[in-house]
């Protein structure tokens, strides 16, 4: 398990990162933040979410690898942490795929009612809303 | 088994251990490295639980965004990108200082460690200050979870509202007062240790109000006007200029109500904010133009309780739980700070700094995803 | 092997008996020394008392349910509120049993006591976290009692929306309780994973760990990965009730089926939190009391991990009739069958272990055999429920009730009792009456089957679950079931009596009363507060060849052929410096 071997002075399980490295990671992160904000001004359609998530993932990878010392950590710890994403993916994929399949039944059925009563009679989805037209 | 000598020893200390056990090494560990490795694996596992904890909300987000992209696009424009970006920067910086703090503890730079922890704490407080501005502003507009939602596009800034900002600030004011009192008392009694603890904490507590100020400045020049622009779009008769008029009038309503609350702290912000508003007049138009351009694609009004409400529910759940994590992190950072002043950490025992650091980076990590997912939907 | 006399001229190893100042039960005195203890064994004992109390309370509620169902129109609760009372009683029965008893029973109570001792460690990795997870359990229990006192709870233990967002009962108190209990469970799991990973003494390799530790490890993986999702689900449910966030509440265009997905993403793996430790217990019990090496050690070990991971893929089978998409139901149904493979591997391995073993029909062994019988029925009826076509018919009937009681009670509870009888001498240093113990095991086995076998028939004939009244045609079967419950209750009381009596009148237990080869039998009964003076010599946990029955002293002893003391340089441990 021990990645650095064992010795009595203990210095080798402390792994201080050099300050220039920390600073350069930070500036890279800030740069990526600026890029992600800037790209939001352009309308790139459905690619938008992909671009945004890719940038976020690069940032996350930087934080994990350097700030969280993952690049120098024990492989087991890395596996433990990264496996959590696999389970999140599992959770998201199954739940979302089911929601997608059942979404026709799941589209909003309760429209706004001006009097804010509980709408006991569902109205079909897609019809124009009541309250907004009155509000205008 | 020989039992006599072990039984004679203290119940808490080593049982037949011959080698010396430093004070920071718990009795059931053999070496500092074993202790560190255990803690490290423990905190990684805890972070795994955190990831899965947040995954529930990300899942809810994904489902509802998949089903109602229009709602998410429309509502996202009520979130102020500038504030979100600033907060991202603040958190990234706090991550930097935290990583640096870990380094300081590893190379036994006690003063540097205190400074870095104080910087991290201050950033956390600024983050919360900015968040307070965001939250209070939305609550005033009625952009709330579905059950409480009362936003009305025709009247985005209703007259009668509680001064939410004041109530959010109140605990932090008390906190600041308390820390300042502590500082004064410890200065008076010349207790060096207490002064060294209270000083950075005072700075950190004051930073909440720096965050408030920062938030106010940016909010008044920012895309809060998206809301008004959005509303201007919905009521197509209104001219762009008229919308800006409405912005200013809505803004002044907020300001007035703030002023009438006889809150000097906020009143002082008021003037700065008014100036900012005037200065930013032209910027608003540009900002508004952009956003109006995007909104054209939205066909039906999504700003209804049962549509937008769900977006804001998810927004408050995600950012709220994230903010709670920040608060918890602040608690741990204060604990670390006191211990750092006490010079508890050394190259063989820096685990707590490292573990809190990992937790703090995770909070940052989650914000890295929250920011584009909530603020940058176009 | 156990038979025969001790070979002469060899060295007999037996730790003897602990002194009062060594014994973890007596080395420090006073209530505070218990309440603030960091000793995993004392925390385990406190957990044991806690979960037994919860089990007693929930068991009484179960008795009320069954008595009420003695007559088709309800025998216990009367008046206009009768059905509400019934709803509250079965809800609290389920919620308390699941959250307060079954989930913490083996992992937290017995696991806390056993994991470090079996591992040869001095304590768990984080003793303070361990104590705090016990107090989280206590707080969670207080919340449940609060819910009971306030306005009860009538949602069923699953808290399904939309009912849970509209009912007037104290859903928030109960969900807060479950939320807190979730964290108790997470911290216990986290502690065990770290303990097993980093606290192993020299020589304790992964494949020298007793199978109970493997099962605990697998359980802990689930606790750490699944429980947080329950936490956020319950938090969102509370938010839904407080401010109608519209994620689960259909009134605000939320989706109740999403709640079920969220809930079962935790709660199906939680089923394995409940049963996996039982598998571990049974693996050890069967091997020790058959005095034979466990058959297929690696397969049992790997199948525990496999079950833990596969358990995450099958949650949808709780929702076949809830309105899932047709494709999802098929996928979940298919995946459900995969779980039966590692479960079956275990059962076959246990049987193969018993085959040609020298079986002592001690009380723990009686429970272990009962477990195999009951779990097999429980597991096989699960296949009917995992099959889409039959599940449509059986869903939400007594068939489901009978199925999960066979697994949870016939599996987990029976193995919990087996484990309790097995390690009782180790925990408290007292031997109980074997006759009494066996009697209890037989009564429990009969009472259990009498209670739940008729429910399979009831369910397949269409008797829905959670109903306070029923058609008179079901009366006979319901009455048999109720009589079975009474018998089961008597059996449990006998077991309790036997155990409590041993504390007062029991003989002093030897270090190794059963002839086990795992490390906990190498320290005294009860263990000293420091477990092991120095890291113990670790051997094969299922190698019984050097364990002999010492007729003179009525104990098992380890006999070592005369040989040189182990070399000064022991194999390098994961962390130790080698200076021991």
Image (spheres, helix red, strand yellow):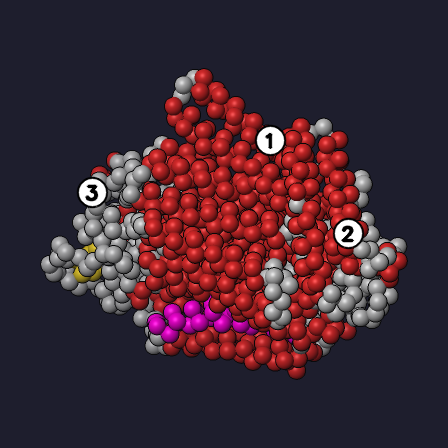
Residue B156 location (% of width, % of height): 78, 49
Judged from the image, the secondary structure of the residue bearing numbered disc 3 is loop
Does residue C99 appear left or right of residue C47 in this picture? right
Majority secondary structure in the magenta region: helix
The nearer-to-camera label among 3 and 1 is 1
Q: Residue at x 53, y 45 (%)?
A: B326
Q: Residue at x 24, y 48 (%)?
A: A11
Q: CA distance from mark 3 to mark 1?
A: 51 Å
Residue at the far bottom in the pictured view: C389
Q: Which residue is mark 2?
A: B241
Residue B103 magenta: no
Task: Examine the image and state in which quarter residue C457 appears.
Answer: bottom right
In this view, the residue in front, B158 or C224, is B158
Q: Chain of mark 3?
A: B
Instruction: Answer with mark 2 or mark 1, whichever residue precedes in sequence.
Output: 1
Q: What range is drawn magenta here?
A: C297-320
Q: Which residue is mark 3?
A: B19
Q: Which residue is mark 1?
A: B173
Residue B222 location (% of width, % of height): 65, 49
Task: Examine the image and state in which quarter residue B128 appears.
Answer: top right
Instruction: Answer with mark 2 or mark 3, whichever residue precedes in sequence.
Output: 3
Q: Are the residues flagged by discs 2 and 3 from a single subunit?
A: yes
User: Are discs 2 and 3 less than 8 Å apart at CB?
Assistant: no
In this view, the residue in front, C324 or A93, is A93
Does residue B244 appear left or right of residue B85 in this picture? right
Characterize the local packing of mark 3: few (<14), some (14-19) or many (20 or more) Cα atoms within 10 angstroms: few
Q: Is residue C531 above or below residue A58?
A: above
């Amino acid at each position: 398990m021990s990645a650095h071997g064992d010795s009595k002075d203990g210095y080798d399980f402390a792994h201080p990162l050099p300050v220039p490295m920390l600073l350069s990671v930070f500036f890279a992160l800030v740069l990526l933040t600026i890029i992600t904000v800037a790209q939001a001004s352009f309308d790139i359609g459905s690619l938008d979410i992909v671009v945004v998530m890719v940038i976020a993932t690069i940032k996350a990878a930087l934080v994990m690898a350097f700030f969280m010392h993952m690049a120098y950590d024990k492989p087991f710890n890395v596996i433990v942490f990264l496996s959590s994403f696999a389970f999140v993916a599992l959770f998201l994929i199954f739940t979302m795929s089911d929601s997608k399949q059942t979404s026709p039944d799941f589209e909003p059925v309760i429209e706004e009612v001006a009097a804010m009563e509980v709408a006991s009679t569902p109205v079909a989805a897609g019809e124009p809303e009541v309250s907004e037209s009155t509000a205008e | 088994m020989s039992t006599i000598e072990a039984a004679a020893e203290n119940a808490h200390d080593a049982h037949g251990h011959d080698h010396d056990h430093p004070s920071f090494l718990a009795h059931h560990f053999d070496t500092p490295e074993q202790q560190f490795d255990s803690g490290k694996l423990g905190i990684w596992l805890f972070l795994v639980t955190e990831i899965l904890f947040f995954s529930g909300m990300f899942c809810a987000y994904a489902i509802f965004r998949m089903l109602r992209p229009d709602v998410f696009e429309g509502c996202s424009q009520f979130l102020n990108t500038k504030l979100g970006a600033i907060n991202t920067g603040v958190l990234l910086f706090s991550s930097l200082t935290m990583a640096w703090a870990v380094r300081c503890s590893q190379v036994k730079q006690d003063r540097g460690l205190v400074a870095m922890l104080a910087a991290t704490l201050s950033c956390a407080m600024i983050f919360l200050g900015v968040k307070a501005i965001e939250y209070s502003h939305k609550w005033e507009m009625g952009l709330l979870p579905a059950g409480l939602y009362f936003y009305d596009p025709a009247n985005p800034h209703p007259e009668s509202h509680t001064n939410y900002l004041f109530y959010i600030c109140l605990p932090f004011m008390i906190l600041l007062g308390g820390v300042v009192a502590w500082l004064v008392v410890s200065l008076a009694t010349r207790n060096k240790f207490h002064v060294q603890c209270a000083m950075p904490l005072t700075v950190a507590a004051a930073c909440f109000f720096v965050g408030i100020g920062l938030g106010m400045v940016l909010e008044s020049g920012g895309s809060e006007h998206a809301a008004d622009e959005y509303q201007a779009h919905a009521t197509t008769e209104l001219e762009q200029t008229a919308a800006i008029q409405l912005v200013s009038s809505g803004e002044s309503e907020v300001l007035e109500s703030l002023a009438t609350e006889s809150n000097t702290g906020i009143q002082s912000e008021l003037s700065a904010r008014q100036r900012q508003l005037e200065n930013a007049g032209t910027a608003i138009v540009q900002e508004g133009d952009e956003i109006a351009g995007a909104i054209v694609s939205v066909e039906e009004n999504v700003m209804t309780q049962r549509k937008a409400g769900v977006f804001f529910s998810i927004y408050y759940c995600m950012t709220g739980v994230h903010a709670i994590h920040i608060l918890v992190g602040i608690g741990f950072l204060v604990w670390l700070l006191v211990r750092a002043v006490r010079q508890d950490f050394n190259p063989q025992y820096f685990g707590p700094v490292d573990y809190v650091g990992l937790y703090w980076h995770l909070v940052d990590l989650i914000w890295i995803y929250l920011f584009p997912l909530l603020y940058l939907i176009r | 092997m156990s038979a025969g006399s001790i070979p002469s001229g060899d060295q007999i190893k037996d730790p003897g008996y602990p002194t009062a100042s060594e014994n973890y039960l007596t080395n420090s005195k006073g209530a505070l020394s218990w309440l603030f203890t960091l000793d995993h064994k004392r925390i385990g004992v406190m957990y044991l008392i806690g979960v037994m109390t919860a089990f007693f309370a929930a068991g009484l509620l179960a008795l009320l349910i069954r008595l009420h169902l003695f007559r088709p129109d309800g025998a216990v609760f009367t008046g206009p509120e009768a059905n509400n009372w019934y709803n509250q009683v079965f809800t609290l029965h389920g919620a308390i049993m699941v959250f307060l008893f079954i989930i913490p029973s083996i992992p937290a109570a017995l696991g806390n006591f056993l994991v470090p001792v079996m591992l040869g460690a001095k304590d768990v990795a984080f003793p303070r976290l361990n104590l705090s997870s016990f107090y989280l359990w206590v707080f969670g229990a207080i919340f449940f009692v609060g819910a009971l006192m306030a306005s009860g709870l009538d949602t069923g233990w699953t808290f399904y929306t939309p009912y849970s967002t509209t009912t007037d009962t104290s859903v928030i108190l109960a969900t807060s309780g479950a939320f807190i209990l979730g964290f108790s469970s997470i911290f216990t799991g986290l502690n065990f994973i770290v303990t097993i990973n980093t606290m192993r003494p020299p020589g304790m390799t992964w494949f020298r760990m007793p199978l109970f530790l493997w099962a605990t490890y697998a359980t802990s993986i689930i606790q750490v990965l699944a429980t947080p999702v329950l936490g956020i689900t319950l938090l969102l449910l509370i938010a839904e009730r407080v401010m109608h966030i519209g994620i689960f509440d259909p009134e605000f265009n939320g989706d109740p089926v999403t709640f079920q997905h969220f809930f079962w993403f935790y709660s199906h793996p939680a089923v394995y939190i409940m049963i996996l430790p039982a598998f571990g217990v049974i693996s050890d019990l069967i091997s020790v009391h058959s005095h034979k090496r466990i058959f297929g050690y690696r397969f049992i070990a790997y199948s525990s991990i496999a079950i833990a991971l596969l358990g995450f893929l099958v949650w949808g089978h709780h929702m076949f009739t809830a309105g899932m998409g047709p494709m999802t139901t098929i996928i979940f149904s298919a995946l459900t069958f995969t779980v039966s493979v590692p479960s079956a591997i275990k059962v076959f391995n246990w049987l193969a272990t018993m085959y040609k073993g020298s079986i002592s029909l001690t009380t723990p062994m009686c429970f272990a055999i009962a477990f195999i019988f009951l779990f097999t029925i429980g597991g096989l009826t699960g296949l009917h429920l995992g099959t889409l076509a039959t599940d449509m018919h059986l869903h939400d009937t007594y068939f489901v009730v009978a199925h999960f009681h066979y697994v949870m009670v016939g599996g987990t509870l029976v193995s919990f009792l087996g484990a309790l009888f097995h390690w009782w001498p180790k925990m408290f240093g007292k031997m109980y009456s074997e006759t009494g113990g066996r009697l209890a095991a037989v009564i429990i086995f009969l009472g259990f089957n009498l209670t739940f076998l008729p429910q399979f028939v009831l369910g397949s004939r269409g008797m829905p679950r959670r109903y306070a009244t029923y058609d008179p045609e079901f009366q006979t079967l319901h009455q048999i079931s109720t009589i079975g419950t009474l018998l089961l209750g008597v059996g449990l009381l006998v077991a309790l009596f036997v155990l409590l009596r041993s504390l007062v009148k029991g003989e002093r237990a030897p270090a190794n009363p059963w002839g086990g080869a795992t490390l906990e039998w190498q320290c005294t009964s009860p263990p000293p507060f420091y477990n092991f003076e120095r890291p113990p010599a670790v051997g094969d946990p299922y190698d019984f060849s050097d364990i002999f029955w010492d007729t003179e002293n009525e104990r098992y002893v380890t006999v070592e052929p005369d040989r040189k003391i182990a070399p000064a340089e022991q194999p390098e441990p994961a962390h130790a410096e080698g200076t021991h």
